[in-house]
Image (spheres, rainbow, N blue to C red):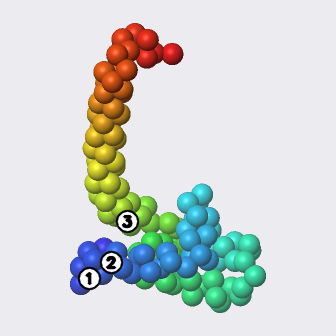
Amino acid sequence: MDGSRTDDELLDIAFAALADPVRRRIVARLSRGPATVNELAEPFAITKQAISKHIQVLEHAGLVTRTRDAQRRPVHLNPARLETLTSWIDRYRLVKEQQFRGLDAVLAREAAETDDHRRDDHHIPPERTAK
């Protein structure tokens, strides 16, 4: 990670990079393995130069890296950077899941209480409520 940028700035840059559907498709393709610019450009109706610019944005965000392999310059996904984004998302997802579990518990209690009140109101023995 770039030591001159804050965590928030790095998140902003990465999420801004992923806001573009072409760049998300490039990331999806790279999740299957490294690829050259030509390989990445194949499914798109845009120029290789445009693909190169998208790759530069992803590189700036730290989401991809390039290496040199003889004449090839494959682009690789940076899994550590993606893990940083995933961790950030998971923090908030887990908070929401806890809230939903709490809500589920409250609703289950209320449903049980309502069921108890119905049986009491109609003098129905508990064994007759089961179907």
Check whether the beta carbons of the residues at disc 2 and disc 1 lie within 8 A of each other: yes
Which residue in the protein does label 3 denote? 85
Q: Earlier in the sequence, mark 3 or mark 1?
A: 1
Q: CA distance from mark 2 to mark 1?
A: 6 Å
Which residue does the image show at 51% across and 16% down from the upper left? 131
- Look at label 2 and name its amino acid: Leu
Residue 100: x %, y % from top left:
34, 48
Give the alpha-carbon distance from disc 3 to disc 1, as whole Å.
Answer: 15 Å
Give the vertical position of 104 relative to 49 (above or below): above
Q: Residue at x 71, y 87 (%)?
A: 47
124 relative position to 46: left or right: left
Q: Nearer the viewer, residue 73 or 37?
A: 37
In screen coordinates, is 55 left or right of 59? right
How packed mark 1 is, by other alpha carbons closer than 10 Å (few <14, some 14-19, many 20 or more), is few
Q: Can residue 61 be seen in this snapshot?
A: no
**Residue 121 position within the rendered picture, expressed as x and y whole percent measured from the top left:** 33, 24
Secondary structure category for the residue under label 3: helix
Describe the element under mark 1 as helix, strand or loop. loop
Height in image: 56 above or below 84?
below
Residue drawn at (26%, 82%) of the image = 5
Q: Where is mark 1, residue-wise?
A: 5
Frontmost of labels 3 and 1 is 3
Judge from the rendering whether residue 52 lies leftward or rightward of residue 113; answer left or right.
right
Q: Which residue is mark 2?
A: 10
> What is the crowding at mark 3: few (fewer than 14 residues within 10 Å), some, or many (at least 20)?
some
